[in-house]
Image: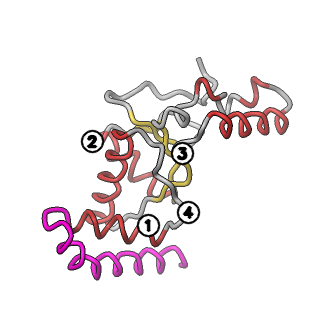
Amino acid sequence: MKAHVLAAVTRLVAVLLVPAAFCRAPGRARFLACQWALSLRFPAEDLRGLAAETRTAFTRARAEAFWRDGQLIGLTSGHRDAAEQYRIFLAEVRRTGSVAAARRRVLPPQESSHVRGLALDVRPTEGARWLERHGGRYGLYRVYDNEWWHFEYCPAEPIRLPHPGAA
């Protein structure tokens, strides 16, 4: 219920922002209003560090999801520097007790698409479902069976793997 109310308020805010966005960028008013409204709905998300093509694909896809289907897509995690990725990987090694087990959920920095700015972890689950159905139009693909939230920018559809550590 709360998620539906927040989504409705976000859509209302976006509609109210369209005139201001039109003054700023007439040909992109709906896109800009969408980005502003989503930045209010998901204030902690950070698009910095994403590769330009990843950022463009993501913002275009979520604008379409928002205006065409009323679906909100937020970014939980995008670019991570190598040190942060290494901390996450080590924490997973400690939690699982082995490197092999950790690799089923987190890759080391030298293998992570997050470090290269090509990976996105999204929310909510409905947004991820929308992106799984329509993201290919933007080069955004779910690449691991065990991570419904993880998408990567790829020019061509990649082979889906069971988990990050799969060869």
Q: The magenta stretch spans which residues?
A: 1-28
- The CA distance from mark 2 to mark 3 is 18 Å
Closest to the observer: 22 or 8?
22
Q: Secondary structure at mark 3?
A: loop
Closest to the observer: 111 or 100?
111
Residue 137: mark:
2
Left or right of 26 in this view: 70? right
Residue 44: mark:
4
User: What secondary structure predominates along the stretch shown in magenta?
Assistant: helix
Relative to residue 122, is residue 143 depicted above or below? above
Identify residue for label 3: 148
Disc 4 residue type? Ala
Identify residue for label 1: 39
Kindly report which numbered mark, 2 or 4, lies closer to the viewer in this rendering. 4
- The CA distance from mark 1 to mark 3 is 22 Å
Q: Residues within 10 Å of mark 2 (few under 14, many from 20)?
A: few
Is residue 9 found inside the magenta-colored segment of the image? yes
Kindly report which numbered mark, 1 or 3, lies closer to the viewer in this rendering. 1
Whether the residues at callouts 4 and 3 have beta carbons within 8 Å, the answer is no
Is residue 146 found inside the magenta-colored segment of the image? no
The outermost residue toward the front is 24
Image quadrant in which the C terminus is located: top right
Relative to residue 159, is residue 19 depicted above or below? below
Res 76 quadrant in image: bottom right
Q: Position of residue 11 (x, y in %)?
A: 35, 76
- The CA distance from mark 4 to mark 1 is 8 Å
Res 12 quadrant in image: bottom left
